[in-house]
Amino acid sequence: MTPKILTASVVLASLALAGCAGKPKELPPQPEAATTTRTPPPPPTPAPAGPVPGSQADFLASVISDTIHFELDKYNVDTESQGILQSQAQWLAKYPGKKITIEGHCDERGTREYNLALGERRANAAKTYLVGLGVDASRINTVSYGKERPIALGSDEASWAKNRRAVTITVE
């Protein structure tokens, strides 16, 4: 090759390369966004407005208390306890299919046997009062835990007073 042809070839090749460098490279087309039909989630189910009617939670929300208290070595239902049991009887009248268990409890003083017997008398006193208000006796079970299930663990009058109790629990 002659130097003129060689120079011309180099110039043409340089021009060709220079022409390519200025052109923007073509990129492959962007993939289109996938269009899937997405069903929106269902709206959240609203929570119930209150406790389920007839449940233990409903019982607790509807009565004055589920617990009555007693004096030392006593099992008589006092005036305050009568009001509590009356509210329980009214709730039970609304739900005639519900049954309850009344738990009798004592403080830590006295023997196990003595406290089991006293707890039974306390549970039965509450039952007798409810039956007197018209609650069918077959709907009420009683159990005595004596001093075995204290709710206050102190060895003082305030703790003992909390533990001398009868508690009503719904079962059906």
Image (spheres, helix red, strand yellow):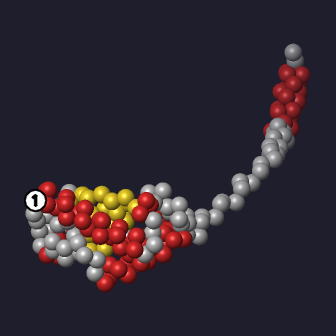
Compared with 147, 8 (above or below) is above
Q: Quadrant of the N terminus?
A: top right
Point out the residue furthest to the top here.
Answer: 1
Residue 15 visible within the image: yes
Image position of 43 (left or right of 4): left
- Determine the residue positioned at 10% across, 63% down: 110
- The residue under label 1 is which amino acid type? Thr
At horizontal 53% and vertical 61% (from top left) the residue drawn is 97
- Is label 1 in a helix, a strand or a loop? loop
Could you tell me residue 156's position as x and y percent?
12, 73
Is 142 on the left-hand or right-hand side of 63? left
Q: Is residue 59 visible?
A: no
> In the rendering, at what x and y percent does residue 39 appear?
77, 50
Q: Residue at x 71, y 54 (%)?
A: 41
Q: Is residue 91 above or below residue 43?
A: below
- Could you say which quadrant of the image residue 80 lies in? bottom left
The residue drawn where x is 31% and y is 62% is 103
Q: Is 115 in front, or is 31?
A: 115
For the residue carrying disc 1, how many other residues have a C-alpha within 10 Å: few (<14), some (14-19), or many (20+)?
A: few
Residue 76 locus on image (x, y percent) = 25, 76
Left or right, 13 with respect to 159, comes to right
Relative image position of residue 3 (x, y in whole percent): 85, 21
| Residue linked to disc 1 | 111
